[in-house]
Image (cartoon, grey):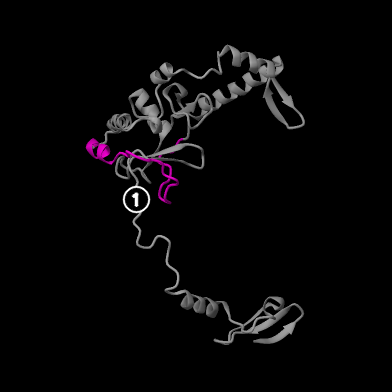
Amino acid sequence: MIKERKGDTALRLCDECGHEQWVNYWNIHKKSEHLCRHCSNRRNGTYRQGKYTSWNKGKRSNPRKIGSHYLNSSGYYEVWVGTHTIPGLKGGYYREHRLMAEVMLNRELKPTEIVHHIDGDKTNNRYNNLDVLSGHTEHRNIHNQLERLSMELVRCGLIGYDKETSQYYLDPFLRDEVSKSGELLESPNEKDEGNQQRSLRDMSHEERSETIQKWSTLKRVEAPDTLLANLAEGDDIVPSPLKDGADCSSVNG
């Protein structure tokens, strides 16, 4: 009940426990009964008990499989390698670009080393798009060099700037000429694609198993048979990681 009113506030008296509290008058003036938060939650909980079933009650979630992957919020692919694959690995995920770089160099990367994506695409983890740098300083210098080169192209007129949209653009004539000549924008033919090293997620089941086994050897990991047995054969896309699926490498590419 409403015990007292002062302007837009009212002293509400709980109909069940008698608790008094000043609340907004207009939120309660049309209600037939007045309950405090504790009594309201208790009544709602009793009413809902047994009437609503959890959406995943009685269902067993499929365990994650070795080789499955997802795209994290930073734009990098994370590959599930197991929680006990590497000593001290948290979450069981390892970044695909670092895994591919280690297989490419046939050695384990140092924690300070950076994997640079040459074309700027974080999801393109082919060997020809990865370059291992000594650290953040060298990585920053490369991006600064790319910016200086872009400004040189602007001064040469090959890259324009639209003030209305505040965006840079490639000269249309240059784009057409390059597209016609196929020197830069031509997609590789089937023969070239077969010779190019693909990223881990684009490999077949057999290729993925061989790559992960090779990588596990570099990491001095035992039980490659377990990796083979648990490799994902079907749909190996994991929509999102669990809360414990944090990044396992301390350095980004």
| Residue shown at 55% from the left, 78% from the top | 40
Residue identifier under label 1: 62
Residue 233 magenta-highlighted:
yes
Q: Nearer the viewer, residue 20 or 180?
A: 180
- Pick out the residue farthest to the top: 181
Q: Measured from the top left, where is residue 199 in percent x and y?
A: 41, 29
x and y, in percent, of residue 161 in the image: 72, 25
Left or right side of 22 for 231: left
Seen at 39% across and 29% down, the residue is 100
85 horizontally vs 161: left or right: left
**Residue pictured at 57% horizontal, 25% vertical:** 143
Mark 1: which secondary structure? loop
Q: Could you say which quadrant of the image residue 32 lies in?
A: bottom right
Most common secondary structure along the magenta stretch: loop
- Up the image or down, 39 lies above or below 74; here it is below
- Residue 231 visible at all: yes
Query: What residue lies at 32% left-to-right and 33% top-to-bottom?
Result: 205
Q: Which range is magenta?
A: 224-251
